[in-house]
Image (tube, helix red, strand yellow):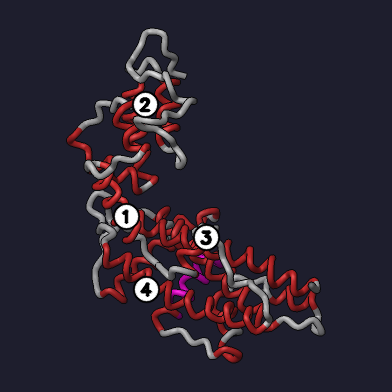
Amino acid sequence: MQPDEYWKNFNLGTELDIAGRFLFNGLQAFHEMEHFAAEEDAFEFLYSMAVGVERLLKIAIILTEHDTSADQESFEKSLITHRHQDLARRLREPHGLKFPARENEFIALLGRFYKSQRYGRYSLNSVSAPTQERDELVKFLEKHLAIKIDTSCRLSATPNERKHRKFIGKVVSKIVNPVHQIVENEARRLNIYTHEVDYRSNASKIFLSKKFDFEDEDILQAELMAYFLSSEACGPNAQFIRDRIKPLPFDPALEGEYLAALRFDRKKIAVLDELEALYEDVTNFKERRELLKASALENLTYGEEVEDEEIDGIEIENGEDGERR
């Protein structure tokens, strides 16, 4: 295999996975946004999206344009840019890539963010426009969804709803899917495997499943909860949890918050504080932690006939000699 073939097959294959992970992270960040008032949330979403789209475009450009007879240094210098629209234009003539007006507008938004707003708050001039990226994102949503979004106060801010998430997923898909198709077509033309990603990677959700929202994950959580709370859950893990782990006295009035914490990392923070307080009354902390770790083992063997030797004999009742830390 020649160096340029190795570069395009393996290194760009890694880059494709990286691009997919950034896109995944950006969409997940948008999914977890509770409202539109926080500029930090807008930054997290736009940053990941800008990086993911840029890297994907550059992969497609390399596979399309690179020629071993050309000046390698000049070619690589041409890739040192964060102008998303300019990168997209390089794919227009060879592949007929044309985005709809709405998607072009979003690409331009990403370009402005990455060029001018990414480090904007490090400048004293940001005092006059501290929420620029949030405001641009809100204007984009308001324009294309024909709605009004309140960002004046976090307590009264417009909540992020299904229609917003579905809309953003659709916009991103109409940008990502055509570019990824170019990557796939060019890889096949060159008889390499750049387009293949590990199905276990977050990138597979974007490039293989072509899913651009997290609604399925929300449904999956609810279905799994329904299963584990029913008598149908009779496998070793469910039996082990029922038999060996005494539940902590969480507040039944906060069950909705607990379920949200299972799904969203940012929701875990408040519940972790409550867990810390509950652990103050647990005297066999080390033993309990070992049981909790064992309960999540994928290959746990536990039941009437076989018990895991490593966890056999561990008690979970509070005792006098237990150690919390």
Determine whether the residue tagged by mark 1 lies in a helix, strand or loop. helix
Where residue 296 sits, quadrant-wise, is top left
Quick check: 317 left or right of 73?
left
Work out how far the residue at label 1 is from the one at label 4, CA to CA, in angstroms: 21 Å
Dot 4 amino acid type: Lys
Asked if residue 196 lies left or right of residue 300, the reply is right
Q: Report the residue marked by disc 4.
A: 170
Tag 3 residue: 21
- Which residue, given by chain and number where applicable, does mark 2 sit on? 276
Residue 128 in view of the camera: no
- Magenta-drawn segment: 104-115
The residue lying toward the viewer, choosing from 256 and 266, is 256
Graded by Cα atoms within 10 Å as few (under 14), some (14 to 19) or many (20 or more), the crowding at tag 1 reads: few
The residue to which callout 1 is attached is 220
Look at label 1 and name its amino acid.
Leu
Q: Looking at the image, which residue is at 26% across and 61% down?
A: 161
Q: Is mark 3 on a helix, strand or loop?
A: helix
Amino acid type at mark 2? Glu
Dot 4 surroundings within 10 Å: few (below 14), some, or many (20 or more)?
Answer: some
Q: Earlier in the sequence, mark 4 or mark 2?
A: 4
Q: Quadrant of the N terminus?
A: bottom right
Q: CB atoms at circles 1 and 4 under 8 Å apart?
A: no
Is 111 rendered above or below residue 250?
below
Residue 225 is situated, as x and y percent measured from the top left of the image, at 27, 46
